[in-house]
Amino acid sequence: MNKRTCQKISPNLALIAVFILTGCMVGPDYKRPAVDVPQTWRFEDKEAKDVVNTPWWEQFNDPVLNDLILIALQENKDVKIAAARVEQFLGQYGTTRAFLFPQIGAGASAGRQRLSQSTGPVPYERDPSINTSFDNFDIFVNVNWEIDLWGKIRRATEAARANLLSTEEARRAVILTLVTSVASSYVNLRDLDKQLEVTKQTAKSYKESYDLFSLRFKYGTVSQTEVSQTRAQYEQAASNIPFFEKAIAQQENALSVLLGRNPGPIPRGKTIDELMFPAVPAGLPSDLLLNRPDIRQAEENLVAANANIGVAKAQYYPTLSLTGLFGFASMDLSNLFKGPAKMWSYAAPVTAPIFTAGAIEGQVRSAEAVQQQALLRYQQVIQTAFREVDDSLVDHRRTREQLAALARELEALREYVRLSRLRYDNGYTSYLEVLYSETLLYNAELTNTQVQGTLFQALVNLYKAMGGGWVVEAENKVAKGQ
């Protein structure tokens, strides 16, 4: 029944309305807004698989990473805060919904009091036989029930339920972010480990060259310039070692916090070269509306804001309540439950606003403005989701191409280093060419490792952007203690 029908109800039908108007609610009913959904993604991967609902991190094939993610799901403080927030809104939903039903209470009291002998029409002090001290006992049950004629309580319950579902989706969004953050941090850690390893090996090789040239200079076979060149090359590589060690320690500390621990070392599993690339997840743009927790959270916020408009508009209409009281009262405890001590009352008070100086109108306008904000936020979250997926697909495609090109560059640079050393040993060039070729190779090895890590990150970001049932899988692993 719509608002106009509700307004036509005559006062004579008030009692009937208590029973038959349960479907009468003012305010707009929620309808999902139309969304402009692209038909396809910019890049369609022919090797994409339907793995969006599986625990994708297990595809890395690293048991250590699996253990770290499980620890994070069990111990991370953000997850625990989100779970506690769900409990908070569950309580608020129960409180709001309770007002749909009669509120029944009981009370009892026992006391003694003394009246003044100097007050009243006939002061008690003139008649000493009057006892001004007496006992008082009472026990009662009271009932109060606001009849939800216009759906105010039902709209408030609808909003509370939507807020509860919103916090549940927010909790899932925290889990989504946590799992992807742990995976990304672990990949970045193994990336830094590989760069440190390459740097140490390179510095060791440069140190051997420097020692060799120092010995040759001692016997007069090379110049001081060549010795200085090899030394500078060695010191440059050596200076990168503490840089990577610092970055590794900071990455371990960040990962420790994600695990709900104090900063400290992180166990290692497979190297970045041994990690397996997860499969590219398949999915249509329309799937995001169901798979992304943040989109579902934004929609529930819109549902709540929409329902609150009805709560505000219901204040324009009269409020009908049923109240009742039944109990016993007596000055003598032995007579408390006898017939003369019985007392009762019932009433059906009706209140209605007449003049509020625009207070209700202001609340309605405020609720409608909040609903518009929630609608725009919902549309914005959807657009952001489409962009994130598209960005991740582009990142994955182009980074894979970049990594293939870097592999070819490394092959060419290794050959360049071999030939430049051969030319130097045969006196066809200076050692400066050798230094240059080795520096290019070292930088290319670092870049190759970084891009390798970037490709892993792109896949992790793609699973994060897609959302999916894997969030529920993560929840189940925590519940089962797997």
Image (spheres, helix red, strand yellow):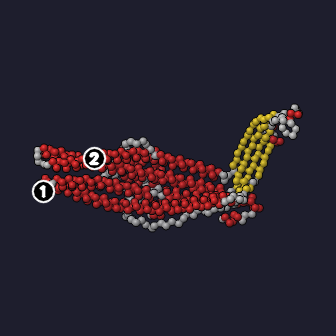
Q: Secondary structure at mark 1?
A: loop
Whole-percent x and y of residue 40?
43, 66
In the image, is 296 to the left or to the right of 188? right
- Pointer 1 residue: 428
Residue pictured at 38% horizontal, 42% vertical = 264
Q: Residue at x 52, y 58 (%)?
A: 298
- Given the image, on which type of amino acid does mark 1 rest? Tyr
Residue 369 in the image: x percent, y percent? 58, 61
Q: Residue at x 80, y 43 (%)?
A: 342
**Quadrant occupied by the N terminus:** bottom right
Q: Is residue 123 left or right of residue 235?
A: right
- Answer whether labels 1 and 2 touch (C-beta < 8 Å): no
Image quarter of residue 399: bottom left
Quick one: 21 or 416, which is closer to the camera? 416
Pick the residue in front: 124 or 247: 124
Q: Secondary structure at mark 2?
A: helix
Q: Amino acid at mark 2?
A: Ser
* Residue located farthest toward the top when viewing the structure as drawn: 128
Label 1 to label 2: alpha-carbon separation: 31 Å
Q: Earlier in the sequence, mark 1 or mark 2?
A: 2
Of 219 and 462, nearer the camera is 219
Point out residue 39 in the picture as x, y percentages from the top left corner: 45, 67
Across and down, in percent, residue 293 comes to: 49, 56
Q: Which residue is mark 2?
A: 239
